[in-house]
Image (cartoon, coloured by chain):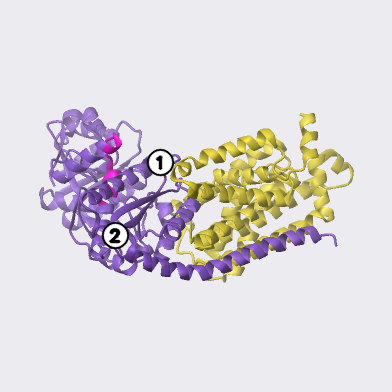
Amino acid sequence: MNSYYVQILTVTGINIILAVSLNLVTGFTGQLSLCHATFMGIGAYTATLAALKLGIPFAVALILGAISAALFGFIIGVPTLRLKGDYLAIATLGFGEIMKNILLNLEITGGPMGLRGIPKVTNVYVVYLCVTLVIFSLNRIMHSRVGKSFIAIREDELAAEAMGINTANFKILAFVLGAFYAGLAGGLYAFFFRYINPNNFGFMKSIEILSMVVLGGLGNTYGALLGAAIITVLPEFLRSVSPVIAQYRMVFYGILLVAMMIWRPQGIMGENKVMKRRGQAA
Amino acid sequence: MKFSKSLVLISILLIVVLTAAGCGQSSSQSQQQGQQQSSGGTETIKIGTLGPLTGNLATYGVSTKNGVEIAVDEINNAGGIDGKKVEIISEDTRGDQTEAANAVTKLIQQDKVIAIVGGVISSETMTAGPIANDAKVVMITSSSTAKGIPEIGDYIFRNCLSDEVQATQLAEYAAKEMGLKKFAIMYTNNDYGLSLKNAFEQKAKELASVVDVETYNDGESDFRAQLTKIKSFNPDALYIAGYYTEAAKIAQQAKEQGLNVQILGADGFYSPKLIELGGSAVEGAVFTAGFFPDDPSEAVQNFVKAYKEKFNAEPDMFAAQAYDAAKILLTAIKNAKGQGGEALQAEMAKIKDFPGITGTTSFTEEGDAVKDVLILKVENGKFVKIR
């Protein structure tokens, strides 16, 4: 085991945080978000700027990043979470593009050049400490009244409302929590790679996170964890098998996703019954 | 207990990760020993290339890899370095930062390359550079033009044509060799045009005078307003910091207005379309370029021939610059007697006036290339090299 494996392990850890946090929004609460990488970016930029310009210590900068991402989650959540399904997805897509353009044009973010010279503070221990804390807190939330409300909203918003759940508030809460964890992951990312630019946090990254969640199984934290691990490790694994396969590794990756959706649409560890009911309704 | 299942899962995960990471630290030392041993006894010298070989930036990455292959073929056909063959290991980044970090770590840790040519795009070099620098592996990029790349560390070098360098050198050439005194500048309003304009203006003001600076946008076709204004200052030369389509139209409209000036430009001019669109108006235009495949010199013609034979394609600027970067690297490896690390870094820094196909190269203290940029001229509807 050398530092190459440690590196992949660390990236996997960061992706796990992203996937399980998106799973909270999309898997448990049923709100399709296409701007998860944007929250990650806000966290990354805030943490980096706090550390570089203000000299704030790493741990505090990480939390600041997560809080500012949560704040943006709230700002975007309030006006858009009245929208449903596809409409919400498009609104979050728009938010992602706006933020990317802001990051590209602000002076303080370094524009398209990004920010460099970030100290390398993140290591595999820090990342997995965060992974543990995130999964543990997510489990507590999902077993609480709040978590049950999230699931109720996903299953049937009208019925949830009839049961006295303030669906708008809980949807915003899910968004804010998801953004918080994504911001944390963003901070870890910045302090690991030592260089960030707006393109790291674009639409494609959001889709990558979403495919981790869908592959692992929507609505299952450990599914999201598994999905993140597979999607991070697989391209690297194929790279080392043989040069020929390495060339086509993105093709294998695509085939895997297509095959999954055909034979196991609920994902590896997904909740079968939920998807079935949706299938009938459609 | 309610959460016992998840707690067990988390603890298993933690145990696996922590043991694995712990092993990583102890084994990295034994690897360094292994590396030292192998550099003494193996038959091949391994170098890596890093760049996008798939995805929408693949064309740059593939050209770069091909250029390196030609340079390595040459040295292997000539018997290698001290009898050892050079082996290339190419890793794909898809132009993605995370993949670049993984790929460079793999090259260094798994394949144990002693040097790397890459990355291709600036953002991947920004991520991969610090990793290579920490591992004391020499890395030379042949196309990442962003500011601050050679400053990453002592082990990071760059061999490419930056906008600043080409504009500065053309200003020098125009003022000193061509004897031009009064410059007017027109630039396209983007990163490229702006950095060319700034560098040219600064140098031209130093050596002669700049009488007027005008701007335009790509895609525009009427430049008469700007040209009328420029004409009132009666300049000797017009520097167009932009691409060939607009440059050809500007040259034509300048001629129509009776503005008889020397047209100057940068590598954005370099396309047969310039002559096709500009006709007689661009005759005599002088501009800088990174690589000129029609250069009659033997080195260039050998490269073009070898490239066409191996890849059945015309070499572009990326291939030529990567070829030069690889040649510089291989020369340094030879001088370092096949050693990597500090010995190779010291030899790289010593490279001076290296005669390449993209100009003569030396490195600054930071590791950025200082080279004599090629200067081309339009003569009888053809490009010719004048420097």
Q: Nearer the viewer, mark 1 or mark 2?
A: 1
Q: Is residue A19 left or right of residue B170?
A: right
In the rendered image, which residue does mark 1 sit on? B58
Task: Tell me which chain appears yellow.
Answer: A
In the rendered image, which residue does mark 2 sit on? B368
Tell me the colour chain B is drawn in.
purple
Q: Is residue A47 left or right of residue A180?
A: left
Q: Tell me the amino acid under the disc marked 2.
A: Asp
Residue B275 visible within the image: yes
Which residues are drawn in magenta? B310-324
Q: Is residue A195 above or below residue A247?
A: below
Q: Residues within 10 Å of mark 2 (few under 14, many from 20)?
A: many
Residue at the (56%, 56%) spot, across then down = A11
Residue B8 sits in which quadrant?
Answer: bottom right
Residue B302 inside the magenta-drawn segment:
no
Q: Is residue B123 left or right of residue A167?
A: left
Q: Residues within 10 Å of mark 1 (few under 14, many from 20)?
A: some
Precedes in sequence: disc 1 or disc 2:
1
